[in-house]
Amino acid sequence: MNRQERRAWLEGFGEPPVTGSAIETAEQELNLGWRGDRPVRLIREDALGEGYAIRVSPEAVTLRGGESGLLYGAWELLKKQALGESVTDIDCQPRYALRMLNCWDNMDGSVERGYAGRSLWFEGSRFSYDPDRIRFLGRLLASCGVNVLCVNNVNVHEPAQGLIDEWLPEVSAFAALLRPFGVRLMLSVDFSQPLRRDLETADPLDERVRAWWRERADRVWEAVPDLAGFLVKADSENRPGPFAYGRDHAEGANMLAEAVAPHGGVLVWRAFVYNCKQDWRDSGTDRPKSAWETYKPLDGHFADNVILQVKYGPFDFQVREPLSPLLLGMPDTRLALEMQLAQEYTGQQIDLFAMPGLFREMLDAAGPERIMAWAAVSNLGRDENWFGHPFAGLNLYAFGRYGWDAGADPERVTAEWAALTYPRLPQNQREILCGLLNRSRSVYERYTATLGLCWMITPNTHYGPSPDGYEYQAWGTYHRASRDAVGIDRTSRGNGYTLQYPPELTRLYDDLATCPDELLLFFHRLPYDYVMRDGRTLIQRIYDDHFDGCAEAERMAETIASLSLPEKDLAEAVERARLQAQNAREWRDVVNSFFYRFSGAEDAHGRPLYI
């Protein structure tokens, strides 16, 4: 813990600031007011790095760690104090060394897929921010355990190319505000920038291009010596990349990795590559297969400082997807698991969608040991409460927690957040709030995308129902509903997608007797009268899920209104719950009527369907 953050920490928790020579000593004694008034001794031990060790004796609590480790250990002690938990001996190291937020902020102040207001640090094509709020952001991220912030959109547009050029003094000043909190910057870069600025090519094997990037990296790290690295989106959704020069992605990534390596930087290369100009008539092309087909042949070809960042599912942050097979099939490549805190397809921070269960599910499926970095698209914005929905802060807190403990219990994580955020909420009401949050993912799934159906959402805005909205566009085809059946056969007998998985998962997903219900129509094409394991027909299950999910969303709105939350949070939560109930009713009626018109099957319970 460095001098600046130690002072802020002390002041923020009611202790007098430490001044003079005392702050320079290797050992610092604090009093946090635990029962018995045992002091807390902070001892710098750089060998522990970001980790920390806590030892408890009758006389004192001793916290050891490197500069950032002391900071994280201090937050752990404060958390235990706030939760009323006893302090015990702890030895803690983060599970993932790189725990990164990807911010899709544009320099004009907009945030792509941002649902909490405008950018916290860009406006008017320049840096524009309140320094105190950025320092508060650093403290917020440190308290969650996040250590890297990629500040600009992966879709790099002018003038953001200047972040590694003329804007470097401003980047350096911004980095300095976050550095005391153990937060390092990362920058998204445009693969074609040499072509746009100085050269007539961006070919990664051209020595002039390689020299251009080496010189640029030297300048960037001179300005920001602790920059974590570069992030690249290439050959995806019309972004430039090595395919334009007949090169593969290992050749493209390794060229950039070579430039940043002398500075200790990493090159994070996004694996989100697919054909976004597909003819809907083409039933042979299947978007979930594309990442594997691009990257599997390159396993073992990437440089040691390249991290391949893979979205958790093979589509794009849908409500329910299986784990991307890339995360299981590239043993000789360093991988980052990418999540999305911004709720692009999961309610846009209007509808409740708590993510701790999703994080645990995907980490368990991947095997935490296979992953070496943990990344997520940010849900932060300039709104007064940072997240739009006052409960969406849970997802950032949980993301940070799982970066340290991949096996954390989701309900425990939710309970911690609720207690830390609303300490004055009566215990019985806090339990009600936690219950709502723990159910919220299932509720949203039932009224939107049950049984693994994907992309039945309004194009472009990605909020509200449109069952055929993407079905005839160039981005792919997703359910191919007809009068007889729905779903795509992705089994080994169908288009072969399941063969990208290890054999045990291929068998699991291929077999209707073992394929999980929540992924049934992702992997299988089935008639509407198919009988589910619970005895209901497929169409009745679709109807029931949408009716039940909508009813639960309406009950959630009533429950939220009854909570004794702070006035601003309550008003915001009540309004967003009202909008969620409205959204759920629209999803229920549109999707159920869509399938009613195809199947002709009445609801077994006589509930309204519309022709």
Image: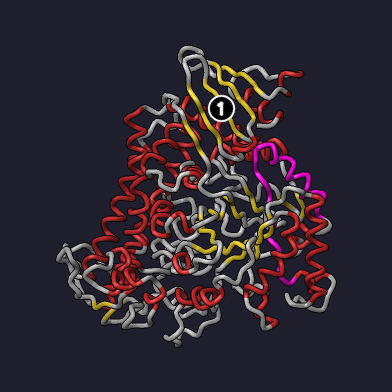
- Give above or below for 517 relative to 14: below
In this view of the protein, which residue sits in the foreground, 254 or 292? 254
The residue at 76%/63% (across/down) is 161
Q: How many marks?
A: 1
Q: Quadrant of the N terminus?
A: top right
Neighbour tally class for label 1: few under 14, some 14-19, many 20 plus, Cα within 10 Å: many
Determine if the magenta segment contains residue 415: no
Q: Which residue is mark 1?
A: 63
Which x, y percent locates residue 572? 48, 41
Q: Is residue 121 left or right of residue 598?
A: right
Q: Is residue 201 left or right of residue 8?
A: right
Which x, y percent locates residue 491? 33, 78
In the image, the segment drawn in magenta is: 167-192
- Can you tell which quarter of the image residue 143 is in? top right
Task: Please say whether residue 609 is visible from this viewpoint.
Answer: yes
Task: Indicate the secondary structure of the residue bearing disc 1.
Answer: strand
Determine if the magenta segment contains residue 179: yes
- Give above or below for 466 relative to 27: below
- Can you tell which quarter of the image residue 20 is in? top right
In this view of the protein, which residue sits in the foreground, 360 or 485? 360
Q: Quadrant of the C terminus?
A: bottom left
- Give above or below for 360 relative to 493: above
Identify the coloring: secondary structure
Q: Amino acid at mark 1?
A: Leu
